[in-house]
Image (spheres, rainbow, N blue to C red):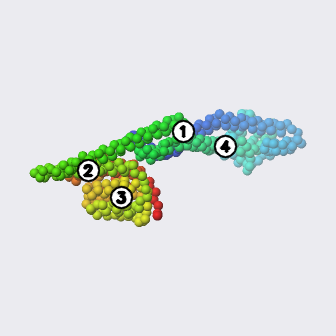
Amino acid sequence: MSLLSRIRNSESSQPQSLLGRTNLTLAISSFAIVIVSTLALNAFVIIPIAERSADDEAALLVLSAQTWVELPPQARPYFELELAQSHDLIISVAKQSLPPLDRYLPFVQTLVEKLRQRLDIDVQLYDGEDLIWVDVPMADYNLQIGFAPDRRDVQLLYVAIAIATLGAGIVFLTSLLIVRRIARPLVQVGQQAEAFRGLADIEPLPETGPRELVLLARNFNTMADEIALLLANRTTLMAGISHDLRTPLTRMRLALALLPENIDPALAQRFERNLEAMDTLITDALRFAQGTRETAEPVALLAYVSQVLETFDQPIELCSNIDDDLVVNLAPNAFSRVLANLVGNGIKYANTVRVTLSATEVVVLDDGPGIPEAERCSVFQPFYRLEASRNQSTGGSGLGLAVVQQLSAAHGWQIDIKDSYLGGAAFHWCFDDTQAAQE
């Protein structure tokens, strides 16, 4: 596997949102901090405290045994009671038959080491029902002293869990607060960029927050205004030029009609075809300019699509799963232009064209040569033709699909090309940004 593939796989396995990625990064770093903190706490706090506590406990056991031996016999019961009540220690003179201690208790093991250092003898531990007993020879007595096994046991696991849990909660809340303050403006920028179609009526981003986000919002607003102005000027210029070309085109048609009869008919037909091609280009430009400025209005979807399809000489099969009275909000002229271009494109290069209609999508299918997957983005470029599969004699200005893409972008529609089950191309045209409502 290449390095690029590994990078792509690692990117795809990461959370997609900024909050998710930030929390993942902070979680990994927090987990490392928890491990280091737990080890440092154990090495510099818990272990020294445990050793000091075990040493104090060993001193208490030895001192208790020494005091018991030095007390008169009649005072020993009171001392034993005081030890039991105040220190949870039980002193027994009688030798008990108990099994050796085979459980691992960290504090008890440390206690045994401290007792061995103080008594300078090998110390044996026994496992009782509730207590752990230790032999403490003192003077002529071989005392057994019992103490609770969990008296000062160190719970390192619980310490680590507590640190990890509380630390994770603090990290999550902190990252949530930070990311929300950063992500909310970025989400607004992303939504505005996705919704921006070059129109001038886009709502500007609020220029508030940290300096970097203010600069980003200000630059985006400036860019949006400049692009909207540029597109508006381009559309106005295109509409003006196209409109002004109508007059010389009409004069040329009139001049062609007034030519003497002895002119070569083939030459006249060539001029006529050129004029028709110019007229098609001008019509496409005017309709495009009008379509980009159009606003949405309620339209009876099924009836409107049927009306557009009836304008073609070739019958177009329409498959619909919507109600007859379904109304959607869309720009009617731009909608009809896109649908007519898609159907007309199929008629040029295929024998059968079929349209399927749903409440949010139109699919135009044909049985033609299809469009290679590598060319499906390029066909939306102006004047781009697939010469390998298209016949130049079929005509066309090369602007049909470019107009489709531009009008779709202007109105927030999505256009995609897939393989058709008829054998050719399938244009999936989604207009789900509109709101449908039953009358």
**Left or right: 407 with respect to 83?**
left
Q: What SS does tag 2 mark?
A: helix
Which residue does the numbered mark 1 point to in the structure image? Answer: 208
Earlier along the polypeptide chain: callout 2 or callout 1? 1
Task: Using the rendered view, name the quadrant where residue 135 is placed.
Answer: top right
Q: Amino acid at mark 1?
A: Thr
Which residue does the numbered mark 2 point to in the structure image? Answer: 279
Find the distance from the CA under tag 2 to the CA under tag 1.
51 Å
Query: Which one is in front, 255 or 181?
Result: 255
Which residue does the numbered mark 4 point to in the structure image? Answer: 155
Discs 3, 2 touching: Cβ within 8 Å: no
Earlier along the polypeptide chain: callout 4 or callout 1? 4
Q: Residues within 10 Å of mark 4 (few under 14, many from 20)?
A: few
Q: Residues within 10 Å of mark 1 (few under 14, many from 20)?
A: few
**Left or right: 32 with respect to 222?**
right
Find the distance from the CA under tag 3 to the CA under tag 4.
67 Å
Q: Depth-wise, is mark 2 or mark 1 nearer the camera?
A: 2
Query: Which one is in front, 51 or 376?
Result: 376
Percent position of residue 140, x then y? 81, 38
Percent position of residue 177, x then y? 58, 42
Q: Which mark is residue 363?
A: 3
Percent position of residue 157, x then y? 63, 43
Find the distance from the CA under tag 4 to the CA under tag 1.
50 Å
Find the distance from the CA under tag 2 to the CA under tag 4.
88 Å
